[in-house]
Image (spheres, rainbow, N blue to C red):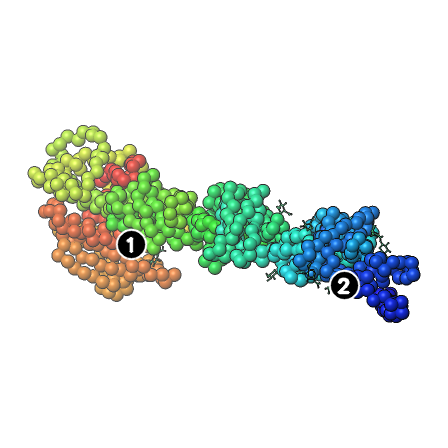
Amino acid sequence: MTKLLFFKVTSDQLLLCVFLSLLWGITDSTTAAGKTTVISSSSTSPATTSPTTTPPATKSPPENVKEVNVLGQSENNITLMWDKVNNISTYLLQYEGKGISKVENINSPDSEASVTHEVSSLTAGNKYNFTLFTVFEEVNSTGYMFQAVTAPRNTDVFEAIKQNETSITLQWNKVNEILNYILSSNGREINVTASEGHEQVSHTVPGLTNGTKYDFILFTVFENVSSSGVTRTAATVPSKVTSVSVTERSTTSITLVSKVDVDKDWSYLFQMNEESVPLLPNRATGVVSHRFTSLQPGRAYPFSVITQFFELNSTAYEDYTVTRIVCASVQWHVTNSSIQGMVEGLFTNATAKYESQEHVSPGSPNVSFTGLYPGATYELHLWYENNSKHLNQCEHSQTIIPLRLHARCENWDAGYSVRIVWDEPQSVWTAVEVNVMGKSHKKVNNGENYTILSGSLPAKHYEVSLTSLSGTGKGSEQRSEPYVFSCATDPRGVIAGSVFAVLLFVVLVCLIVFILLKRPDIIRRKKVHSKPPYKKTISVAKFPDHFYQLSGDDNRGFSQEYESLISVGTEQTRKEAVLPENKARNRFNNVLPYDWCRVKLTTSNPNSTSDYINASYMPGYNSNREYIATQGPLPSTVNDFWRMIWEQKVKGIVMVTNCTEGGRTKCEQYWPAKSDPCPYGELTVTMTSEQQEPNWTLREFRVKHSKTSEERTVKHFHFTAWPDHGVPQGTEVLIQFRGLVRQHIQREGAGAPTVVHCRYRTSACLVSGPEPSLDTFIWKPH
Ligand SMILES: *[C@@H]1O[C@H](CO)[C@@H](O)[C@H](O)[C@H]1NC(C)=O
Ligand SMILES: *[C@@H]1O[C@H](CO)[C@@H](O)[C@H](O)[C@H]1NC(C)=O
Ligand SMILES: *[C@@H]1O[C@H](CO)[C@@H](O)[C@H](O)[C@H]1NC(C)=O
Ligand SMILES: *[C@@H]1O[C@H](CO)[C@@H](O)[C@H](O)[C@H]1NC(C)=O
Ligand SMILES: *[C@@H]1O[C@H](CO)[C@@H](O)[C@H](O)[C@H]1NC(C)=O
Ligand SMILES: *[C@@H]1O[C@H](CO)[C@@H](O)[C@H](O)[C@H]1NC(C)=O
Ligand SMILES: *[C@@H]1O[C@H](CO)[C@@H](O)[C@H](O)[C@H]1NC(C)=O
Ligand SMILES: *[C@@H]1O[C@H](CO)[C@@H](O)[C@H](O)[C@H]1NC(C)=O
Ligand SMILES: *[C@@H]1O[C@H](CO)[C@@H](O)[C@H](O)[C@H]1NC(C)=O
Ligand SMILES: *[C@@H]1O[C@H](CO)[C@@H](O)[C@H](O)[C@H]1NC(C)=O
Ligand SMILES: *[C@@H]1O[C@H](CO)[C@@H](O)[C@H](O)[C@H]1NC(C)=O
Ligand SMILES: *[C@@H]1O[C@H](CO)[C@@H](O)[C@H](O)[C@H]1NC(C)=O
């Protein structure tokens, strides 16, 4: 406005001057330039110079520059540029601000049309007032005024003070109370306006990605001019691992594995048992893992995994796990129904499993299972429950003690072997160990229920012990308590020998009696002299030899043997036999039973005499009453004879005589001749079979008690080959006959005595014999 006004005034004055010069006839010719300059200079101070007083040569002030551009600024300098005015090269720049005031002369090279000038040594972030004068021939123009600012300082502190997964909070110090800042990151700019009063400015950048690095540039802004900018790199917090699995657990080590994103530049810090291990993931497998060792068994170990990035820690993934327990080193106490043990280490629960049975013991250190199946092998498991996960703390196979087997002996192989049979126990067992007389005999596997103990001797006692075993494999085998029992071998071989010996003695004695009666001369020739009682045992095997020895020289041996027996038993009483009422019941008054071993009949009435019968018990192997030696019944004693058979439960009668010899009755036929029943007192006897052989006749009687209707079978062995006079020629027939009798006794058992009678009744009693296997007899015919 002023310029325009000034220009207007100038042009008016110009017109006036032209008019005056024309008026006053000044037609002096000057240069166009000089004219212009003059005009210009005259016009520079229209107010101060009066047109009348100022000489025409006075220079007019040059023009001001039209415009000044600020090309740029820094903290200390400002670069200005302007176009020259009328080709003038000299300028004067005056500026002031923030306590300074300066004037600069500027001489620009002539060649250039514009002037570029840098004002330096300024202070940052300040506004300056500039006046630019155009100087022409030492005349100042009026001055062109403008303002310019220097760039502000950068902040001296710029940092990330806080970060989480999605944001970073930055903080910086204010610069000269400047409130405007630009925060740039990844090409994005944010204008931050600080609030007044605080020394520091903070700003949170949201919406970031976890575990990522960001570069931030902070510009201070002063009057639309930014500082050079200060850079800071910061990162967001990485996310924690999604899961950590325990891939291996032993008693002393644990392996942790986590699946991670390998594209991130993250590292991982595994911590357990006061050990921190920084790890990088395996790029090939995409996992990060570590095995912790030197741990203690059965303990809980908390662990944590921290993701690390740019010195930032993620929140920790925390969990714990437990080391396993050494089950095998536990002292397990087993019985036949329980397992017990003190277990050190962590577990919540213990189980014992056998087939479908499962037993549970609670988590106390004293593990106890009861009511188990004997001999079974249990799978023991200790469990630890962690967040509904069942951790197997240890497993162990434990066999418990099997039950004892109960066994018994059975006769086998005529006493030369024993069969040991055991009952199947309510127990698992794999084998049984058989010990005989303290020595290991045999180990029998399950599946058999007997073993044969061979090479034993008959009629002996063996101590047998059975131990059942269960469990296979070294150290796991369990043994029951031994079942010890005594095992008697079959005595029948010995009994048979005794029976035969007895029979032969009977025969022998019959023979001797015969000789004595028929050939008394043989005896009488010898002087009767007292000899020790005859006491001799003859084995079955040696009997034939012995027989032939005795029968040699006209049966002389028998006579001698008989003679030696004469004095035997004379000192023993026979009071009952000689009572007057019993006299008639004896066939021979010199063949009488001793009181102590006579057979007594039962008496229904107190009248005592009816208990007498001429019969004596004779000992055998099993008992002192294995045989009854009796006389051939008299007609008056036939009923008594049968009564005795019934009462003594006799099953066999051995008859070594014929009923008549040489026309004389030696024995009443006490059995029915035909198959018709025949009564003998209260008993009825029926002959059910008769089998005649050359040397003997075998009969079978059915004996029935009329009162009770009880029926029994009695065998009759009738040796018929006895010659009328003398003794049989050989032993063969006798031995065969003995075999028959022996078979019968064996079949029927030795429960009842067997009745023997021959031509003459003999009186025989056991004298002594501490050893049960020896039968010692003294024979005394009277
Ligand atoms: C002007 O400032 C800039 C940037 O700060 C610098 O490079 C330059 O040297 C300064 N000039 C002078 C004359 O100081
Ligand atoms: C300015 O002066 C220079 C030499 O001093 C000259 O070459 C140039 O032509 C002049 N420019 C004008 C517009 O007068
Ligand atoms: C600059 O000029 C303005 C007026 O244009 C004035 O208000 C101010 O005080 C001046 N600054 C200085 C430092 O002289
Ligand atoms: C031009 O101006 C400056 C600053 O104001 C002054 O120092 C100088 O004397 C002036 N020159 C003339 C010829 O007026
Ligand atoms: C991160 O920090 C910001 C600001 O402090 C907050 O608003 C945000 O909820 C935080 N985010 C998480 C995931 O903690
Ligand atoms: C920040 O301020 C500048 C001027 O100072 C303006 O041009 C720009 O648009 C602003 N940006 C935002 C995001 O407000
Ligand atoms: C972390 O960032 C990834 C992308 O890089 C994203 O998939 C994940 O969900 C983020 N995790 C959290 C906890 O925000
Ligand atoms: C900054 O620039 C904007 C336009 O870009 C303008 O409107 C404003 O007045 C300027 N501020 C200053 C202080 O020069
Ligand atoms: C990160 O965690 C480790 C281990 O806990 C610790 O030593 C370190 O100081 C933590 N760093 C930060 C920045 O918290
Ligand atoms: C014991 O453990 C078994 C298997 O882990 C589980 O089924 C049972 O419920 C547990 N019993 C007790 C009493 O904890
Ligand atoms: C089982 O064991 C108990 C105690 O150890 C014992 O008394 C019992 O006789 C045994 N039972 C059998 C059948 O072995
Ligand atoms: C022995 O086993 C046989 C079959 O193998 C069986 O018939 C018999 O009864 C068993 N004896 C005992 C005593 O268990």
30 relative to 441, above or below: below
Residue nearest the viewer, comparing 122 with 467: 122
Q: Position of residue 665 (x, y in %)?
A: 18, 52
Residue nearest the viewer, comparing 131 with 54: 54
| Quarter placement of the N terminus | bottom right
Q: Which residue is mark 2?
A: 31
Q: Position of residue 79 (x, y in %)?
A: 71, 55
Query: Ligand 2, what quadrant?
Result: bottom right
Q: Residue at x 55, y 47 (%)?
A: 278
Q: Residue at x 26, y 34 (%)?
A: 570
Residue farthest left in this picture: 553
19 relative to 406, above or below: below
Crowd tier of the residue under label 2, counting other residues whose Cα lies within 10 Å: few below 14, some 14–19, many 20 or above: few
Which label is found at residue 430? Answer: none
Q: Which residue is mark 1?
A: 748
For residue 247, side relative to residue 489 (left or right): right
Q: Amino acid at mark 1?
A: Glu
Residue nearest the viewer, comparing 528 with 581: 528
Crowd tier of the residue under label 1, counting other residues whose Cα lies within 10 Å: few below 14, some 14–19, many 20 or above: few
Name the image quarter holding residue 726. Answer: top left
Instruction: Check disc 1 and report its element: helix, strand or loop.
Output: helix
| Residue 1 appears in the picture as rendered | no
Q: Residue at x 36, y 50 (%)?
A: 431
Q: Position of residue 81 (x, y in %)?
A: 72, 58
